[in-house]
Image: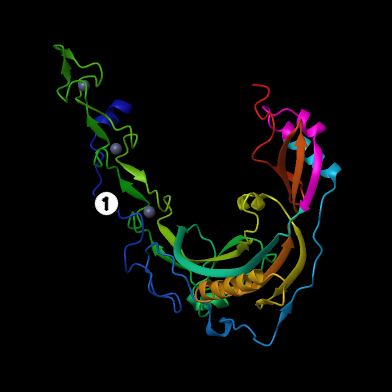
């Protein structure tokens, strides 16, 4: 049975060759409000409607209360140093246990943070095999414009992406790859179902005998299509029709900008990124207004600069949903001490009491 099948020419002229995997240009119809991207994969960004171009209100002023500078005790500084030393296997804990403190100098470090929570909307055509599912097409009404498609708002300041079908944008079309046949001609055997035997090069004979690989037939069954000469269409999975729809991608993103004035040249500012501070001032609004009257003028200037920067960067392409500005006091103490007649110093920083030191005594004592 199998051998007979192999000898037959299964070529069926009605089975089409493979078409494109994506719908060709002009394949899909225009949907009002979503024109200009006909089946290609670009993701146009929809600028927010004019009503949502945010305008900061000049009459609001933001003043910040004065704050105390936190400091750590000798016990806390020593504990922090001991924990730090234990995490470095080449460091000896002896100096940390036996050092003498000379001075604990608290340093005032403010961190300014601006968060702008934005929503972006893009769209693209998508399709799936049509298996009789409901088709929400234009007969049910006009598709709402991108910014009118209803979505559920996530929790503020959390990064989320939601994909949703644009209402009434769905329709059915014959599959563009198989032209609605459900299958496509096998490209390996060109629809014949068999391939020339590679062992005897199609002669049916090898070493003056009948070829044992193809049993003398010169051709072998095509492995790719199992001898059928065709394959189930990889785009419609044999369903023949595709359901096309516009998929709207809504992206919520919290855009964060941090700033710490550089007041302590011996301490690398990057270290602050890993620790938390005490947020003594939090101001949240649709749009925040630059901080005024804060004792540190640099914080005021940066606040104005970052707010302007976020406004110009996001208002053209995103809808700004909420802003939040925070001033944190980040603990930083410079500890001066001596150990066996030598002076050294280290920093304790962050609410977590992390330690930074560039010259710990006997750093390589064990080696
Ligand atoms: Zn084949
Ligand atoms: Zn052969
Ligand atoms: Zn198909």
Query: Within 8 Å: ligand 3 and the Cβ of disc 1?
Result: no
The residue shown at (17%, 25%) is: 202
Q: Nearer the viewer, residue 298 or 216?
A: 298
Please identify the residue farthest to the top as the structure is shown. 208
The residue shown at (50%, 73%) is: 317
Specify whether residue 1 is in view: no
The residue shown at (35%, 61%) is: 23
Q: Is residue 281 above or below residue 59?
A: above
Dot 1, how many residues are within 10 Å of its Cα: few (below 14), some (14-19), or many (20+)? few
Residue 136, percent from left and from top:
53, 70
Image quarter where ligand 1 lies? top left
Rendering quarter of residue 307:
bottom right
**Badge 1 is on which residue?**
14
Q: Is residue 219 above or below residue 179?
A: above
Specify whether residue 281 is in view: yes
Residue 96, percent from left and from top:
78, 34
- Quadrant where the C terminus sits is top right
Residue 61 lies in the magenta-colored region: no
Residue 96 lies in the magenta-colored region: yes
281 left or right of 240 in image: right
Span of residues in magenta? 85-105
- Quadrant where the N terminus sits is top left
Please identify the residue farthest to the front as the structure is shown. 341
23 left or right of 311 in image: left
Rendering quarter of residue 343:
top right
How is colour applied across the structure in the image? rainbow
Q: Is residue 81 above or below residue 349?
A: above
Residue 224, percent from left and from top:
33, 35
């Amino acid at each position: 049975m199998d051998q007979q099948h192999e000898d037959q020419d299964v070529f069926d002229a009605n089975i089409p060759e493979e078409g494109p995997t994506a719908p060709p240009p002009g394949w899909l119809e225009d949907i009002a409000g979503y024109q200009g991207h006909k089946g290609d994969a670009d993701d146009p960004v929809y600028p927010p409607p004019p009503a949502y171009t945010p305008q900061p209100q000049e009459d609001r002023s933001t003043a910040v209360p004065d704050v105390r500078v936190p400091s750590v005790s000798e016990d806390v500084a020593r504990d922090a140093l001991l924990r730090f030393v234990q995490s470095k296997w080449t460091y000896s804990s002896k100096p940390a246990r036996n050092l003498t403190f000379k001075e604990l100098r608290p340093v005032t470090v403010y961190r300014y943070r601006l968060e702008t929570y934005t929503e972006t909307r893009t769209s693209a055509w998508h399709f799936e095999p049509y298996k009789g599912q409901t088709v929400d097409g234009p007969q049910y009404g006009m598709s709402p414009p991108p910014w009118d498609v209803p979505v559920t708002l996530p929790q503020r300041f959390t990064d989320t992406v939601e994909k949703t079908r644009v209402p009434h944008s769905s329709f059915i079309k014959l599959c563009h790859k198989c032209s609605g046949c459900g299958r496509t001609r096998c490209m390996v055997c060109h629809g014949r179902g068999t391939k020339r035997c590679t062992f005897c090069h199609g002669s049916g004979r090898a070493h003056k005998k009948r070829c044992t690989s193809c049993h003398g037939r010169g051709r072998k069954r095509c492995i790719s299509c199992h001898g059928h000469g065709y394959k189930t269409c990889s785009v419609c999975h044999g369903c023949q029709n595709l359901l096309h729809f516009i998929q709207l991608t809504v992206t919520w993103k919290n855009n964060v900008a941090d700033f710490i004035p550089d007041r302590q040249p011996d301490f690398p500012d990057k270290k602050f990124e890993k620790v938390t501070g005490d947020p003594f001032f939090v101001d949240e609004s649709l749009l925040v207004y630059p901080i005024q009257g804060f004792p540190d003028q640099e914080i005021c200037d940066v606040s104005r600069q970052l707010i302007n920067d976020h406004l110009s960067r996001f208002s053209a392409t995103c809808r700004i949903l909420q802003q939040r500005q925070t001033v944190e006091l980040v603990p930083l103490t410079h500890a001066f001490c001596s150990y066996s007649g030598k002076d050294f110093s280290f920093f304790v920083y962050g609410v977590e009491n992390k330690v930074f030191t560039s010259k710990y005594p006997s750093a390589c004592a064990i080696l």
